[in-house]
Amino acid sequence: MTANQLNHTTEALSFSGEDLVRDIVLQFPKAADYFKGQRIDFCCGGVKPLAEAAAEKGLDSDAMLSDLHKLAQEHPVLEEDTKWNGATSEELVEHIVNKHHRYLREELPLISQNVTKVFRVHGEDSPHLAEVYRLFNLLREDLLKHTAQEEEIEFPKMLAYSANPSEEALAELRGLLTGLEAEHDGAGEILRELRAVTNDFTPPEHACTTYRLTYARLEELEGMTFEHVHLENNNLFLRYQ
């Protein structure tokens, strides 16, 4: 990490209930962890004021603001944390492909092995594992298809437009992005169902190590997907809207 990346903002961050959840995370990335803990959607559902998002979950927005301001004092924002806000589209696309798409290609087959093994061994005693198996495989298929399509079609069109903008190319891109965001919404809904059916990824007391590992990996997949979608919906895609 360079000296510049170690610098942090000297001006205190301040948020209000009218700030969009998405914008809070863009300004203060640590808020993503806080919102995940509060079950606040900051990626697909991030285009709403914090007060509204809190009310939907039955949470106190003033208390949440207090928590966020305390976190901001304890965790100064490093330039490294927000560097993707100012990165070129080419740099951001490269980061998404090398980190998030690569993660999915490497991890989904391994998670699949765990999900399948746990379902086969414990499915009779834990009937909900059949639904976990179904939902995961639906999610895996959707994510792999989605990322391949982005790399083959949408990302090249974005970078081509950045290099040579035209109204025609922009109109086409906006149509494609609407479809991608709908696919993100679909993945988010599957993850919500997975969280519900697994009781917030909480394994039963009798769960073996593989059972517990499977839930932990599913929760990690959820977190990585939220970060992935946030970078696309709330950063990259906005450049073409």
Image (cartoon, rainbow, N blue to C red):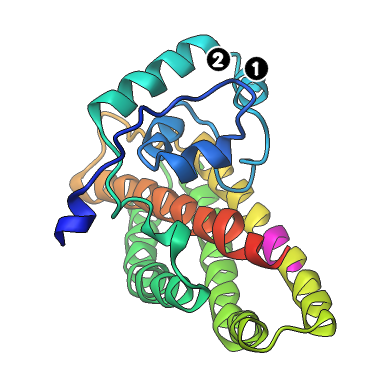
What amino acid type should be assigned to the residue bearing mark 1? Ala
Between residue 33 and residue 126, name the one nearer to us: 33
Q: Which residue, given by chain and number where applicable, does mark 1 sit on?
A: 55
Mark 2, Cα crowd under 10 Å, few <14 / some 14-19 / many 20+, is some
Instruction: For label 1, count other residues whose C-alpha is less than 10 Å away and answer few (under 14), some (14-19) or many (20+).
Output: few
Is any part of residue 127 visible from this angle? no
**Image x and y of residue 81, in percent:** 32, 50
The answer to whether mark 1 and mark 2 are in CB contact below 8 A is yes
Residue type pointed to by label 2: Ser
Q: Secondary structure at mark 2?
A: helix
Q: Is residue 90 above or below residue 7?
A: below
Q: Is residue 5 magenta?
A: no
Which of marks 2 and 1 precedes in the sequence? 1
What separation in Å lies between label 1 and label 2 (alpha carbons)? 7 Å
Whole-percent x and y of residue 90? 48, 79
Foreground of the two, 105 or 125: 105
At 60% from the left edge and 87% from the top edge, which residue is drawn? 156
Tell me the SS state at disc 1.
helix
Q: Residue at x 52, y 10 (%)?
A: 62
What residue sits right under mark 2 in the picture?
61
Query: Range of the magenta residues?
Result: 179-183
The single residue placed furthest to the front in the displayed view is 10
In the figure, is residue 123 to the left or right of 232?
left
- Which of the 4 quarters of the picture holds residue 86? bottom left
Res 55 seen here = yes
